Image: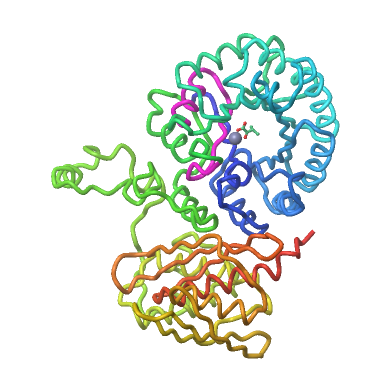
Amino acid sequence: MGRRIRIFDTTLRDGEQTPGVNLNISDKLRIAHVLAGLGVDVIEAGFPASSQDDFVAVRRVSEQIRGPVICALARAEERDIRRAAEALEKAEKSRIHIFIASSDIHLQYKLKMTREQVRARTAASVRLARSLCADVQFSAEDASRSDPAFLCELFETAIENGASTVNIADTVGYAVPDEFAALIRRVMGGTRNLGDTVVSVHCHNDLGMATANSLAALMAGAGQVECTLNGLGERAGNAAAEEIVMALQTRHDLFGLEHGVDTRMFSRASKTVASVTGVYVPQNKPVVGKNAFVHDAGIHQHGVLANPLTYEIMTPQSVGLTGTGLALGKLSGHHAFEEKLSELGLVVDPAVSLAAFNAFKDLACRKKDVSDDDVRALVEEAVYDSHIVDGYELDTFQIQSGNRMQAMALVSLSRKGEKFTETGAGEGPIDASFNAINRIVGQDFKLLFYNIKAVTGGTDALGEVRVRITDAAGHEFPGKGVSTDIIKSSIRAYINAINRSMIQGDTGA
Ligand code: KIV
Ligand code: ZN
């Protein structure tokens, strides 16, 4: 057996910093359960001092998740550290993760601090965190552009004051593999009190080298790697968990390193994260993209049929692509539907299952083949709707639209047994419908983002619409709707976002 690497997942923290992603508490809990099922070692659940919602999300994850260490991020500031400790109170295993920048660029322009001041702040922060939590990680932000000698001094200070993990962050994705590996070796050789402190790495993907840099660092001796599912994260994202782990597994001959992840969960985990965050996975994305195991060229198909080893370096089964089992049709009952959910690894409440089943029956009457992706989309929509109590529901809509007229919509919604009807005019049928809905709810919500995706191919495909709207105070709310009629899915998504705006004040704290 080789060295055991720790997988530190930061989908819920750095991944949430993906532009346009805004996860609420239940979104975070769903992803946290997926991460625990995957078997990651550490879940960075959030940054409690950044908002009340994030505080509650970390608290809920700490209460509910057993197995992985639950980690909370904090700047090197007393308030952040105390907030992190409080949010982690109920965790089975907890970690406070403190960070401060170490590069001269950051010290001069951002922190306006001297190296000595950064060192003193590191000492005080780690000491405080250690008094509140037995497991403290210290990160040097922008470490890859820092003076290695100062980096070693900073790590010595952090370790002296109780840090058990020190993290080397390639914050801006500037490093290249050989150079990054050399930095890891330099830090491991030059940090005098390193002892059994775990050296971690955290790579961003600005130059497309996050996975390569992470792997080079592991080869050079790093013991923990930070990553996100689907490579989510700031700008070009973080190192992708599925790429790193599958590389370790597929090239075990080369790396000789062990991990505790159940790789068969990757496909499901990736789909859940894409669906919850609204950031779709490119078809050609390694490991989890739709084309990752598809062989198009005749020569390739012939080779794979003769022996998959010809063109497949890993099996689809190893990442959980098992192919379709049970086929569903319009005669399928709730029991068969639930079997399908468990085959797809979709664990949902009975109420969500029933709502999705009703939507499925409706769809199956209109669409010949209901695919696994259709089922997944219906379930995700039901999950989205399930947090809403007493919200608006779509009753009916009628549209008039054409190339020589202004689009008009007549929309009826119901809420708490009451029916509301309004008309709206607009640039097209969707604009007109949203204007009618704004009149019904008596608020001028603005559409910030609109995206439509066909769940499968064919003219009878489900169209999945995602929107993000903002209220007059500038608060943003995501919404999602699914239907074979794209105007209906748009209206449902818009209503879903409005319903979410009505419960957003309830942080559940
Ligand atoms: O990219 C970065 O530097 C970070 C730190 C908080 C580790 O995300
Ligand atoms: Zn980062």
Residue at (48, 83) in percent of width and height? 409
Compare residues 244 and 401 and report the one nearer the observer.
401
Q: Give the quadrant of residue 83.
A: top right
Q: Quadrant of the C terminus?
A: bottom right
Residue at (20, 44) in percent of width and height? 304
User: Is 96 drawn above or below residue 482 in the view shown?
Assistant: above
- Horizontal and vertical percent for residue 80? 79, 39
Residue at (53, 81) in percent of width and height? 424
Residue at (41, 28) in percent of width and height? 252
Q: Give the quadrant of residue 84.
A: top right
- Horizontal and vertical percent for residue 408? 46, 83
Compare residues 93 and 17 and report the one nearer the observer.
17
User: Is 402 drawn above or below residue 47 in the view shown?
Assistant: below
* Magenta residues, start to end: 210-233
Left or right for 203, reference 326: right
Compare residues 236 and 329 and report the one nearer the observer.
236
Q: Quadrant of ligand 1?
A: top right
Q: How are the residues colored? A: rainbow
- Looking at the image, the residue that sits furthest to the front is 404
Left or right for 415, reference 358: right
- Horizontal and vertical percent for residue 326? 36, 68
- Horizontal and vertical percent for residue 138? 70, 27
Left or right for 309, reference 401: left
Q: Is residue 253 magenta?
A: no
Compare residues 326 and 402 and report the one nearer the observer.
402
- For the image shown, how many numbered marks are present on the structure? 0
User: Is 79 drawn above or below residue 58 in the view shown?
Assistant: above
